[in-house]
Amino acid sequence: MISFSDYRQQWFGNIRGDLLAGLVVALALIPEAIAFSIIAGVDPKVGLYASFSIAVLIAFTGGRPGMISAATAATAVLMITLVKDYGLEYLLAATVLAGLLQIGAGLLKLGRFMRYVSKSVMTGFVNALAILIFMAQLPELNLGNPGVSWLTYALTAAGLAIIYLFPRLTTAVPSPLVTIIVLTVVVVVMGWDVRTVGDMGALPDTLPIFLIPQIPLTFETLLIILPYSIAVAVVGLLESLMTQNIVDDLTDTRSNRNQECIGQGIANTATGFIGGMAGCAMIGQSIINVKSGGRGRLSAFTAGAVLLALVVGLGDLVARIPMPALVAIMIMVSIGTFSWSSIKNLKVHPRSSSIVMIATVVTVVYTHNLAIGVLVGVLLSGIFFAGKIAQLFRVLSTLSADGRERTYVLEGQLFYGSVEDFADAFDYREVLDRVIVDVSRAHIWDISSVQALDMAILKLRREGADVQVIGMNEASETLVDKLAIHDKPGATDTLMGH
């Protein structure tokens, strides 16, 4: 548990930086929240209310200070069918249930499983997300869309110039904020016809209120929303925990994964009761926050609070922000997110690591589903790792001087990936009085290896040899005692029958 003094430091240790960064993030959240609402098939205010609620609540309950959570595309795409078939109320109910599932995951400490996501998968995740962020800006640069012209390209280029050149003058004010202010003033003064935030959809003009989803409280309803809630909970936690790792690395600090699971769950559960859709951590906005100087909980709180204040109190002004300014910021995020060193490292890193990274990128970009891409990467990592460990396994054998006793010495890890090499090492036709299987330099891991050991012992005994297994460590012995059948009555018939 975090101490009160540390928690207080997370709130007030970087007030100026957090306030300015939160303001930048709030402005960048508006068009994305509207766009994600459109993706899910609901009114823009659903995404805006969700972004406000999640950002504010996660500031209090999350495990990673400085990380931004709000409505996201990753969760929005999972709700499309539910909204289309059953309507908004079912989406709200699914959001509440997804939050409860995430709280349960945190209480069960499932966050520890993130340690099994390899660095190659993480790099692929980051690169794929950078590509998706850039691709999401392409409609705003398509000359065939209303409001998009050569002026859009000129303003976007000007925005990028401000973002990268202004820090040379001063870093007192975040350059993305300067970009938004300058381009908005220029467009308004010059009266240029460019696409604005207001063109993305109507902004809410009232504060959210507490409401209970109007759905039948039946088992049938539960069966309808449960699959969607599970998908949202899993994808939301996966993206949140991976973003958490990235922010940890960016800030050289550590954070609490299980607390983040609980925090995400509380935020989503509460959001469903005020008319908002489910969300999770946003890597793009989190990087904007960190690069703009945000480090503490106050930055996320500021982002959510300012977002609501802007869209409700200053909606007319916010609606006039030109989209090229926000496109420039997101392109900057895309460039900053992509791990450019990973391209150079393709020639240096092991081929298996490069394959995992590339497979993760390709799968995510093709499916637009981060969970599927990460799953493919994790599975490939496991396969390659098992193959490497299996190559380190070997069996040495020596025959006694009188030719009546043979000793087999196992070295390495005996598991499903090495059992074939284990079985091929024995000569079952050799006539021997005694066979010693020395496993003092090996470890037995699973049921496949126990069954392979059973088979070898029984085959050797069938040829008349007295078989003795020596040197087994405590963990291996426990597993063998529990699963092995070579010393049980009828073992030969049982094993050979299967």
Image (spheres, grey):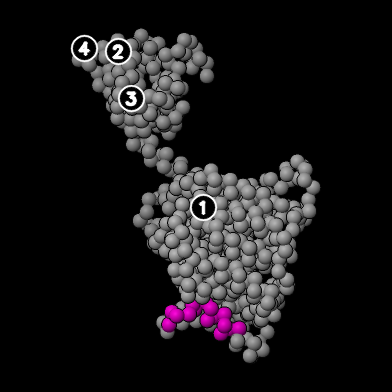
Magenta highlight range: 170-184
- The answer to which quarter of the image holds residue 396 is top left
Instruction: Point out the tag, 1 or 2, that comes first from the N-terminus.
Output: 1
Residue plotted at (49% across, 62% down): 65
Instruction: Name the residue carrying label 2.
Output: 434
Instruction: Point out the tag, 1 or 3, that comes first from the N-terminus.
Output: 1
Up-down: is 266 above or below 406? below
Instruction: Name the residue carrying label 4.
Output: 402
Q: Specify the label residue 259 is tagged with.
A: 1
Crowding at mark 1 (Cα within 10 Å: few <14, some 14-19, many 20+): many
Residue 407 at x, y = what percent? 28, 20
Q: How far apart are marks 1 and 4 (CA)?
A: 66 Å
Crowding at mark 4 (Cα within 10 Å: few <14, some 14-19, many 20+): few
* Mark 2 residue type: Arg
Residue 192 at x, y = what percent? 66, 87
Residue plotted at (33% across, 25% down): 472
Residue 71 seen from this side: yes
Instruction: Name the residue carrying label 3.
Output: 472
Q: Secondary structure under badge 2?
A: strand
Residue 420 at x, y = what percent? 41, 28
Residue plotted at (59% across, 64% down): 56
Q: Secondary structure under badge 1?
A: helix
* Mark 3 residue type: Met
